[in-house]
Image (cartoon, coloured by chain):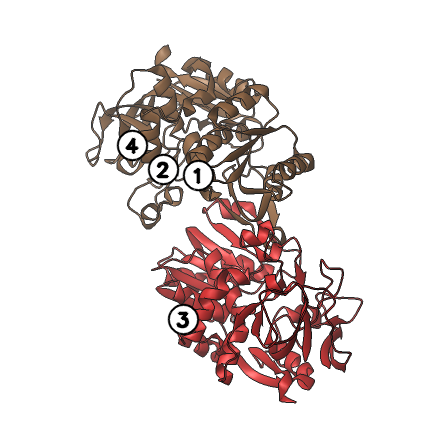
Chain colours: A brown, B red
């Protein structure tokens, strides 16, 4: 089969490798219908994070189960499934607490897992899925290509944007700021609207992303960044700041800008993966009674509700995909996101 | 009248000064019945924070109104009142949001206020109270000296301990850790129990404070600190950490210890005033989906509920006062807290 590997900064290759096999009784093999490139993939692509071995890539994919291990009980061959960006057993204390990314047996796609094996990557034709019962969600195979895209966002970006809004305690009537106009930030706009925000301010300098944000529910756009951006937010909020701020980038700069935009007593949710060793001054929280919460989204806590919304058409997060590539062209999918000519690149293994 | 001033590290003096006057129509003058020394006063006493001028001290006091300005509507001469540790107008957006310490016209006792004047300090016979209508809470003058002490805790420590528990999202059935065995931490134990915590672990090395914590509802005591303290918490929580942690000290050390004791997906509330420039690594929140919230307690958001509990005897926070001084002996009250021979020192101006 074909599978995608990151060899080093800027070096993404699609290689012909052996098909994956069932290696543990709790595994299934999924034939990938659609996958995509994540903004967080770019930390490795840009050399911010590095590895000494080639890494199987792709942590967002949907597809059909083609083989099951002997100890898989919730799924059968032919099931259409959504794979979250983290692998979890579904039964440990953390999973029961709804914090699946902290699962005692947690794993990541393309990385060494608790089973002592490396899980498959999703930018491939086939993937070995460990702990299938605790990890996957079943739905109907959609006939509409647009619906395929919406479902694919439930693997990560839509649930991550929703997590940002939940962590930011967005409540009806709130004024919400979204920092970051990537796919997660745009899904954060959808999430804020779904949770009843009255004003949603998107911080963006790109006209195409501004337009999509408005269609998703943003009521105002702020193009300025840094101190000028914070000043613009203050002006839009009578000098007070926003009730809730969603940080969807993951740099110290964006964290600081987001924190400065929260009103006293307000809350910031953050889901951007901090690539460096960013730190936050405790006194800046204390002085204004601002709360901060964030981390990797527990996809399985949100997926049932969001799946309902996607299936009935009330949200359309798949519109964040503005470019599409065959699997063999995956390196171009990465390059397009790196150059910001694409908000999010879709990869379609079956289009060969 | 007699009033207390901090002249410099270790230099507290009780001086005879002119009685305060009504200076703004929204002022009242309060004759102090009881006041006390706060753990945060010690930052100045120990030279961690310094000032170039003598500061009128005391931000926790209760007493009787003896004079009112012409624009005071909620209070009359003879009313017995509780004064929170922050001054607020009660009408601005922040007050309406329940974040009184961020009031647009906020002030602090003994400090320059929004009215261009220095407010009185509470360790005195009489205090000029600015913005009385927005700041004070009225109750009946208690005949029982024990009740006087309970009411006095509502000016700060009981509400601050409660704020820590609210910020830590304590919910019924939770396992809660309290870091800090001062008056605020002890009140945090009361707060955690009031909010339904099932297990309350107090971190304390002092037998008298351990005993009081147990009487307030602590179910376990951990005497270790730092990494050993965190290890002890993990052992008491099946390796997971606590659902909620209350940080009631305000040093980088205690902040880090508290943060490390939270389980994935849990929440930390912090109310210790950070004396230095402590900072927290963002990645430590992110990795475990831990939320952090804290700041100066909005006393007026909690006081009505806690006053009811105090008056009906269901909580007895005044037991944190384990020493008592006449106003002229206030320097001894400070020294006792500095030496940790007193948990909290009561100051009684009328006992001359």
Disc 3 target residue: B218
Above-or-below relation of A219 to A92: above
Q: Residues within 10 Å of mark 2 (few under 14, many from 20)?
A: some
The quadrant of the picture occupied by the C terminus of chain B is bottom right
Q: Quadrant of residue B349?
A: bottom right
Is residue A52 in view from this perspective? yes
Report if the CB atoms under discs 1 and 2 are less than 8 Å apart.
yes
Q: Chain of mark 4?
A: A
Mark 3 residue element: loop
How far across and down, in percent of the image, does residue B156 sit? Answer: 56, 68
Mark 1 residue element: helix
Are discs 1 and 3 both within one chain? no
Q: Residues within 10 Å of mark 1 (few under 14, many from 20)?
A: many
Mark 4 residue element: strand
Q: Going 42% across and 39% down the picture, which residue do you hit?
A: A297
Marks 1 and 4, Cα distance to the nearest angstrom? 18 Å
Disc number placed over residue A137 in the picture, else none: 4
How far across and down, in percent of the image, does residue A252 sit? Answer: 61, 40
Disc 1 target residue: A163
Q: Chain of mark 3?
A: B
Looking at the image, the residue that sits furthest to the bottom is B352
Marks 1 and 2, Cα distance to the nearest angstrom? 8 Å
Disc 2 target residue: A302
Q: Earlier in the sequence, mark 1 or mark 2?
A: 1
Report if the CB atoms under discs 1 and 3 are less than 8 Å apart.
no
Disc number placed over residue B5 in the picture, else none: none
Marks 3 and 2, Cα distance to the nearest angstrom? 35 Å
């Amino acid at each position: 089969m074909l599978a995608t590997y990151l060899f080093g900064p800027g070096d993404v290759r699609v290689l012909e490798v052996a098909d994956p096999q069932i290696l543990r009784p709790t595994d299934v093999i999924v034939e990938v219908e659609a996958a995509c490139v994540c903004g967080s993939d770019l930390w490795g692509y840009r050399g911010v994070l590095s590895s000494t071995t080639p890494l199987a890539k792709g942590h967002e994919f949907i597809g059909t189960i083609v083989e099951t291990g002997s100890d898989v009980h919730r799924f059968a061959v032919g099931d259409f499934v959504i794979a979250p960006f983290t692998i979890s057993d579904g039964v440990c204390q953390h999973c029961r607490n709804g914090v699946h990314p902290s699962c005692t047996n947690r794993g990541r796609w393309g990385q060494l897992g608790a089973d002592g094996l490396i899980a498959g990557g999703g930018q491939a034709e086939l993937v070995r899925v460990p702990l299938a019962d605790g990890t996957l969600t079943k739905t109907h195979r959609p006939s509409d290509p647009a619906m395929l895209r919406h479902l694919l966002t439930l693997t990560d970006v839509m649930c991550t944007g929703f997590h940002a809004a939940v962590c930011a305690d967005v409540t009806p009537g709130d004024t919400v700021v979204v920092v970051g106009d990537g796919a997660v930030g745009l899904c954060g706009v959808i999430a804020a609207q779904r949770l009843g925000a009255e004003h949603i301010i998107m911080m963006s300098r790109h006209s195409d992303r501004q337009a999509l944000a408005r269609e998703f529910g943003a009521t105002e756009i702020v193009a300025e960044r840094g101190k000028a951006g914070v000043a613009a937010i203050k002006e839009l909020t009578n000098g007070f700041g926003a009730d809730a701020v969603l940080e969807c980038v993951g740099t110290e700069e964006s964290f600081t800008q987001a924190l400065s935009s929260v009103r006293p007593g307000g809350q910031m949710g953050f889901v951007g993966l901090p690539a460096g060793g960013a730190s936050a001054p405790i006194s800046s929280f204390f002085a204004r009674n601002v709360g901060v919460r964030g981390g990797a989204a527990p996809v399985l806590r949100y997926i049932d509700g969001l799946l309902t919304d996607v299936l009935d058409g009330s949200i359309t997060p798949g519109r964040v995909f503005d470019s599409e590539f065959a699997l063999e062209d995956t390196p171009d999918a990465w390059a397009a996101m790196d150059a910001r000519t694409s908000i999010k690149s879709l990869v379609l293994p079956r289009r060969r």
